[in-house]
Amino acid sequence: MDILRKALHLLLIRPLLHLLFGVNVVGRENLEELDQFVLAANHNSHLDIFLLYSALPLNKIARTHAVAARDYFSNPPWLFKAVQFLLRPVWIDRSEGGITAIKEIQRRLDDGRSIIIFPEGTRGAAGELQAFQGGVGLIACHNPDVPVVPVYLEGPERAFPKSAPVPLPLWNHITIGPPQLLRGKSKEISSRLHDHLEALAEEERAYRQRRMAEPHQPLSVAVIGIDSSGKSTLSRRLAGCFEGDSCFIGDSLELFKDRAPCDAQPLVANEVRKWVGRQAKSAKSLAHYKIPKLAELLLRDRLLSDVHRWYRPDRIFMDGSPLLNMVGWAILYHEDAFTENICAAAMDILTGQHVCGKRDPILKKFPELEALRKLNLTHLHLPDAVIFLDVDPVICIERITARGEKVQAHENIEKLTKLRKAYHLVCDVVQQTLPVLRLAGDESLEKLTEEAVAFIRSADNETN
Amino acid sequence: MLDVSPSIYSLIALFVLAGVQLAALFSKGRLEAPSALRSLWIFFSAIALADWFSFCGAMWLLAFVSFCALREYLSLVDIRLEDRWGILASYLSIPFMFYLIQIEWYGFFIIAIPVYVFLLMPFFVALGGRSQGIVFSVGALNFGLFFYVSCIGHLAYLLFYSARMTLLMVVAVAIADGVYTSGKFKSLALRTLVRMAILCPLYVSLARWTAIPLVHSAMLGILIPVSVCLGRFTLHAVEQDLGIRADRLQPGRGRTIDGLKSYLFTAPIVFHYLRWFLKWGDL
């Protein structure tokens, strides 16, 4: 039987792997002198096990057994039989837990046989080394005289990745590291083996060609809220709370480098926006307010692209988001017509995600939307995270009067209450796709900042 | 003597090559067989095979070379996981292209890659579903297809028309390569001139055997060094980007691609030059 097994390996599996995929083994001499070994390799693909067998010296094939999960190979039955005959693996039933398998491995090691094990336990993400399971540590701990050979496989994660239905002919490189005699506690052994494999992986990765780095994507955070809710103070403060480059877009444009403000080159769009913003603020009625405000918001969005392009910050903090403000204001003008669905549809149209025909009823209902669509201004940015500062309009009015500036056309309790409701609705809609934080704005600024910083850090981790 | 078939010469060349390889084998590392010999092995055996046994066998041998080169290139280049359909399609284009040579369908062979494959490939890549990086993927796949399928296909088509001219071209490229790697001549212009000085007389003196008119023989003697020079320069840059180190060629890490780099530019140029001026086929 052993002869047939060897012949099948030599005449069928190896030529097939070589012809179809191409196998390059580096460090074969590391295995040749060993009588018994535990071979620990990274696991990315179904090909791994066959590739490792093709790297073994011929006289060791019959006396080496892989540890394999039964559920991978149990379907179809002929595959199970073939694998059982060719490799005689130690089957692991993952529903049962590993103790029986460990016992079986120990039995074979005592018998003088060698073991191939994938310490990651399962096929991980392509080209990355996952944390090791406990098994390899236990085995090495109980058999201190059996050398552990780290092997790094490069290529199978591209030739036959986890998600792919069929393998493709691409080269595989098998790097056999120097054998290690590991002694100590099982966890220690595990981590040392992980380091060895990681070192081999680093070396292999150095060969890989890399295309251009992915474009820099800053995290944009919008702080929304009604007038005088303290959103501009909060967002400006937040910009100074993070390491790296942060940018604050509010009434002014400020750049922070590692928490300290630094000089920013002026942008034309910003100057224009400021002028338009002044026009909006001096508007006498809500009707006169609409057009300059809309222009200001559009310019602000344009400014966002410019900031991406010229400053390349890591984070952008916005006092209000052009898109969300626009939708909020639209709700203010047409309050009865707005529901969550319409709000979501309007946002999709404004960000250019929703493709609707000319006769879509929503465009009939909101001529402004149609005008924007005709002007091709429907490519607004959706922020990556939203913070809503929820403040009672009464307090806001107090703050506005205390400031002593000229009161804008919409700054009365009735309108601000409506606006607050509108922002709540917007948050409900946005919440389905983006992280949203709602803060009660009457708390102290320190506490608000603290909460917001924690929120942004978690959002940052999520997007990465 | 000049009338004997080209495979005699390629057999002689094979024996010489075998001698060099054996010498390298027995010298225990003192003498190293140059890596360029590998491609010469394949080409000479293909020529002998085509002349004595069957053109089909030689052609499918070259198809296998094309497959190996493309496989190596695709293993080295940074492709996304989503490009698998595109990769599969580019592998499938190899039997397709070589089948076109086998049935002598020149018209379709010549437009198959620039028209149909270059149109279908972006489609298959787009099937992958992720748009980010798609331009680079399409570019990488098209580059591989053009050089490692189309150009080697041209070599096979040249072999189909005339084993002699193929033999002469392979020898000429090998000589040009030899001048390049000997490193005696430092400047590029000088190297190209030296090659021309060797190859022009060679082609002219063999004009009766190859049945190429004298003028065109001389022209080929000029054309081949120039195209070898262009090819080496271009593909050297590509190899550097792919991370192939000429001093450390490993299987799967540039051994095949590096051996072929001088032939890739020359094969289509010589083929089309001869086809046009010798009025092969139905123009």
Image: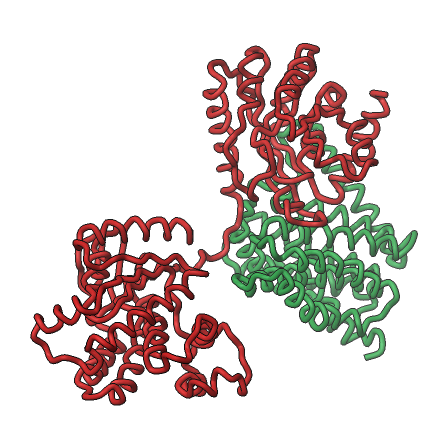
Chain colours: A red, B green
Q: Position of residue A308 (x, y in %)?
A: 34, 66
Q: Position of residue A428 (x, y in %)?
A: 40, 64
Q: Is B115 above or below relative to A433?
A: below
Residue A33 visible, this angle: yes
**At x 86% / y 68%, what residue is drawn?**
B104
Location of the C terminus of chain B (image quadrant) = bottom right
Identify which residue, B29 or A388, lies in the foreground: A388
**At x 16% / y 66%, what residue is drawn?**
A395
Residue at the farthest right position: B53
**At x 74% / y 63%, what residue is drawn?**
B203
Q: Is residue A187 left or right of residue B41?
A: left
**At x 23% / y 49%, what residue is drawn?**
A450
Identify which residue, A259 or A289, lies in the foreground: A289
Quarter location, residue A29: top right
Q: Position of residue A408 (x, y in %)?
A: 17, 80
Identify which residue, B208 or A448, lies in the foreground: A448
Quarter location, residue B15: top right
Q: Is B49 above or below relative to B142?
A: above
Residue B227 visible, this angle: no
Q: Position of residue A212 (x, y in %)?
A: 47, 57
Q: Is B65 above or below relative to A379?
A: above
Q: How many numbered circles are shown?
A: 0
Location of the N terminus of chain B (image quadrant) = bottom right
